[in-house]
Image (cartoon, rainbow, N blue to C red):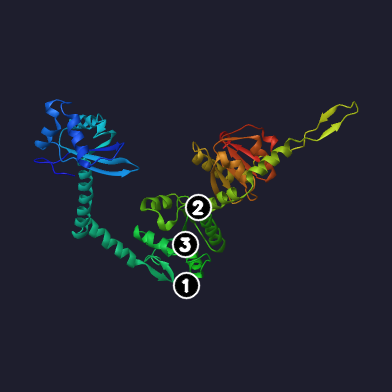
Amino acid sequence: MGKISPVSAKYIVHAQIQIDGVVERPDVIGAIFGQTEGLLGSDLELRELQRSGRIGRIEVKSEVKSGKTFGDITIPSSLDKAETAIIAASLETIQRIGPCTSKVTVEKIEDVRISKRGFVIDRAKELLRNLTDSVLPDSQEITEEVAHSVRMMDISEYGKDRLAAGPNIDEADDIIVVEGRADVLNLLKHGIKNIIALNGTSVPQTIIDLCKRKEVTVFVDGDRGGNLIVKELSSLTDVDFVAKAPDGKEVEEITKKEVHKALRGKITIEQFKLEYARENGNGHEQVKTFRDTRRRVPVQRSSSNQRVHTQRPIRTAPRITEEDKEYKEKFKQMLEDLTGTRGAYILDDKLDILGKVPISELTATISHLKNVFAVVFDGAITSDLSAIANRNQIKYLVAMSADIKPNETRARILLKSEL
């Protein structure tokens, strides 16, 4: 690019030229000045603009192929963009160069300031990066770096199995069991110190002994492998609660917010077992099969050859005796706790809560469970629920209301109005 004096170029006109013959560079430049002379008036005369420094040196690069000349024309301009566009458009009026016909096509008008601005931004980023690397960190950065180092120093080896653990295992009344060392490091980084790792898929004796004397929360990855670890650990020792990382994530990679949210949302081991059984069982199919079986009523033929339907006899539910008053008091309290929640308690024969589920999932949950003694829920007893209760020998159905009569089920029906 030629120099523009006394000001710098703001725009550059890029054009292509095609000539049906062989010409030299001076012929092209002469044609540009000659054939645009007087075309745009005295204010936009190319010679005057170049003399005043508002148009720079016109550059022409050309080559000859097969008896024709092809080339590029660049014209730097310090005019405004409208005037520069007019100068560019005037180039396309050139139809002959020397004795040959020609065609000039303007490809683009480049804004030089854009490329300069890009250079300024890139250079500023580089300077800022160098400044950040070379200056001292602020007080917050120093505090976080020191705290991180201290937490990393807190990791230790615990017990004869040399398990990765935090510093508060012996002092804490409750502990968090995770899968591996990386999980321990992540929780230490977020300020949790009562943690210990399994260090493998098998359960070490150290963990079994700890779980017998402390309240235990198992904190596992949000995948099927995490479920299997909980299942194995709970089969070998005492586990109280289960916490899981978000679906598809591992404990070692989750953020502080996700860690605390997962621990706040922990569930009892009994509820985990119910949910695990529901997810891996065949509850919905069993309900459907039983419904279909229940609808098939035996048919007998009378002497008049008419079809006579006989109803399968159902044992009437016994009345509540004096010895059942204790049950009624507990059922009443549980039903009050559930009022407005649309939830259900599933109880064993000691009236201990095996788990709590939404009533929308109640039939699917209890359809494949064999040790349910009673169900207390915030809803109405339906014929489907009654059928499953009969099949699984559930003794009590406690609810707000009922869509069936007491003599239509083997279970004892207790409604809120009766408690």
Q: Mark 2 or mark 1, which has the lower sequence index?
A: 1
Q: Would residue 155 be visible to someone looking at this image? A: yes
Q: Is residue 178 above or below residue 85?
A: below
Q: Is residue 147 above or below residue 162?
A: above
Q: Nearer the viewer, residue 387 or 66?
A: 66
Label number found at residue 268: 2
Q: Mark 2: which amino acid?
A: Thr
Q: Tell which tag, 3 or 1, sits nearer the viewer.
A: 3
Q: Quadrant of the C terminus?
A: top right
Q: Residue at x 33, y 65 (%)?
A: 152
Q: Tell which tag, 2 or 1, sits nearer the viewer.
A: 1
- Residue 405 position within the rendered picture, expressed as x and y whole percent measured from the top left: 67, 32
Mark 3 residue element: loop
Q: Would residue 318 be visible to someone looking at this image? A: no
Q: Residue at x 83, y 29 (%)?
A: 308
Instruction: Determine contact: label 2, label 1, CB under 8 Å.
Output: no
Mark 2 residue element: strand
Residue carrying label 1: 161
Q: Tell which tag, 3 or 2, sits nearer the viewer.
A: 3
Q: Is residue 151 rendered to the left or right of residue 116?
A: right
Residue carrying label 3: 179
Mark-to-mark CA distance, 2 and 1: 27 Å
Density class for disc 2 (Cα within 10 Å; few <14, some 14-19, many ≥20) is: some
- Rendering quarter of residue 116: top left
Q: Residue at x 60, y 50 (%)?
A: 280
